[in-house]
Image (cartoon, rainbow, N blue to C red):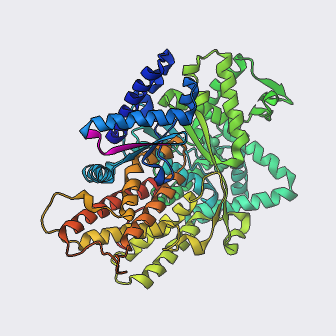
Amino acid sequence: MKDTLRQTAADITAEAFGLLMADLKTDRPELYIFHPEQLYDKLEIPKDPKMGNYALPLFDLAKILKQNPIALNKQLAERQNLIIGAHDNYAHLKFEAVGGFNNTRIRIETLAQFTLRQIGNNAREYGSSDLGKGKSIVIDFSSPNIAKPFGVGHLRSTAIGNSLYRIHKKLGYTVIGINHLGDWGTQFGKMIVAYRKWGDERLLMADPVRNLYDLYVRFHKEEKENQTLTDEGREAFKALEDGDDAAVALWQKFKDYSLAYFQKVYDRLGVHFDYNTGESFYNDKMNAVIDRLQKAGLTEISEGALIVPLAEFGLPACLLRRADGATLYATRDLAGILYRAESYHFEKALYVVNTGQRDHFKQVFKVIELLEKAEMVPLEKAIAPRLVHVEFGWIKFADAVMSTRVGNIIFLEEVLDKAVSLAKAKILEKNPDLKEIDKIADQIGIGAVIFADLSTRKEKDVNFDWDKVLNFEGETGPYLQYTHARLSSLLRHYAKEKPTEINYTLLAHAEEERVIELLYKFPLVVEEGADSCEPYIIVSYLLELASAFNKVYQRKDNQGRIDKIISDNFELTEARMALVRAVRTVMNEGLYLLGLEAPNEM
Ligand code: ARG
């Protein structure tokens, strides 16, 4: 969606640069950057609304022109305003030179009309674009280790990945969501041994994942005292890799039970994957990559194992095959990269995985880079530069009871259950007559957990605090959902008399202006979220929008009375309700992009 207001600002600026160039008697070929298209992309949205609707930083341009940026800015603004003065249909714009920033200000009525009409016409499609048309993005996210309960450790990857999935879809990308399940590796050898020693089919059927987990914990405990267990586990995994029927059948059983269980959790979270291809999917694809690496002369044998040495890059060697022939996590990721590149021709492949695996991804990406260099793959075809580790910090629970469980895993289901029951208690206290209480408690409780995960910049740790995440007044998911429900309720209660032409000049208070500016900005916020792979950008935007709207809602007139949105003044009410409708639409879509439901009542 091209923003025509922004385009006009870019056009005028290009024209003004043209005049300026003529006056400066410069015509150098590199000045192509002053074309409207380039300027359109260079316009930024200032954080501080006082700086106008757009800012064009002039520092780079001034350098090219060998001019002082401040002086250049003054001259530029003079010419921009001259052009405006000469055209009636540019009257809604104004340019200001502030230091090295050339700021554009759009007259508020124009901005209001433009924005509210766009939102009205496009509804939740507002902010969508075809920026990513014809490009695919692979997102590897969630990716828990199966035959283990879903622990909170994989919650952030699930929440961040799901949000990035939705954000990129909105921008027109073909998005391929992959759950790279940990369904292969030595731990499955251990599971097989544990099950053969202590397992029981009936227990397994009754509560499969809990039972598998208990076996896993027991194995690890006994392994500490009994070294032979480790060897037995390794042998069992070897048998599995060699396709031993009995081992494969057991593994398949663990896998089927686990997947059914994981699917239930994903359904609760509203998370969808295009492929549930776990590590085992690459079993028959690893030889090919190992061959290529060997042919490229990148491998070495070290203590019987096949490795790619990476010391010169300050990294530990990448282990491809152990001395006993078993393959590794990294080998499967290497095979996965080549498979995905070939199958999806991705523009980018994002790996949404905790910072703890930084070295792993550095190694794996480096190996692909070395392979492509050795094979002399031209840069524009190379895969390595398209691989991105989207890393994030830990989630910490202050909740002592939950964090001291045996095996030190906090079960995600328990967290979700607790959140839902707390949400239900809140609803019963605030709005006991609400219909479908259980459904809405689900939406709020689960939304609160997801939101808590996204509510700090991803590289920071999350401190999960039960007193905070469900607070309807704090900076929480429920607070945004509540704002949305309140907007919905206003719309329900407003019985429209007759359709009218909206008089946008009536939205003239500073509080309303702020909301309009924020609404106008939404499409760019979505792009920024995608560019930086950071759902938090949407989080902070929605919090700002909610707080700006609440200021409109609570605004007092000069007698100190609340200036109600719905009043006897029909024309005024219509204009304000147009604003309400637009904020609700954007709030609804914003919550969706984060992976939250937006109930109409709560
Ligand atoms: N299963 C891994 C873990 O829990 C995460 C997998 C991430 N994705 C990948 N392609 N390596 O640590």
For ligand 1, which image quadrant applies? top right
Q: Quadrant of the C terminus?
A: bottom left
Q: Is residue 92 above or below residue 77?
A: below
Q: Quadrant of the N terminus?
A: top left
Q: Is residue 57 above or below residue 451?
A: above
**Residue 453: x and y, percent?**
57, 59
**Residue 566: x and y, percent?**
25, 73
Q: Which of the 4 image quarters holds residue 460?
A: bottom right
- Say whether residue 104 is left or right of residue 335: left
Q: Pick whichever, 318 or 519, lies toward us.
A: 519
Can the viewer see residue 321 in this picture? no
Can the viewer see residue 445 in this picture? yes
Q: Residue at 58% of width from left, 57% of height from top?
A: 155
Q: Which of the 4 image quarters holds residue 502?
A: bottom left
Q: Residue at 35% of width from left, 60% of height from top?
A: 583
Query: Magenta segment, which residues?
Result: 89-97
Q: Residue at 70% of width from left, 17% of height from top?
A: 296
Q: Pick whichever, 282 or 223, lies toward us.
A: 282
**Residue 215: x and y, percent?**
70, 60
- Say whether residue 179 is left or right of residue 212: left
Residue 597 falls inside the magenta stretch: no
Q: Is residue 546 above or below residue 65?
A: below
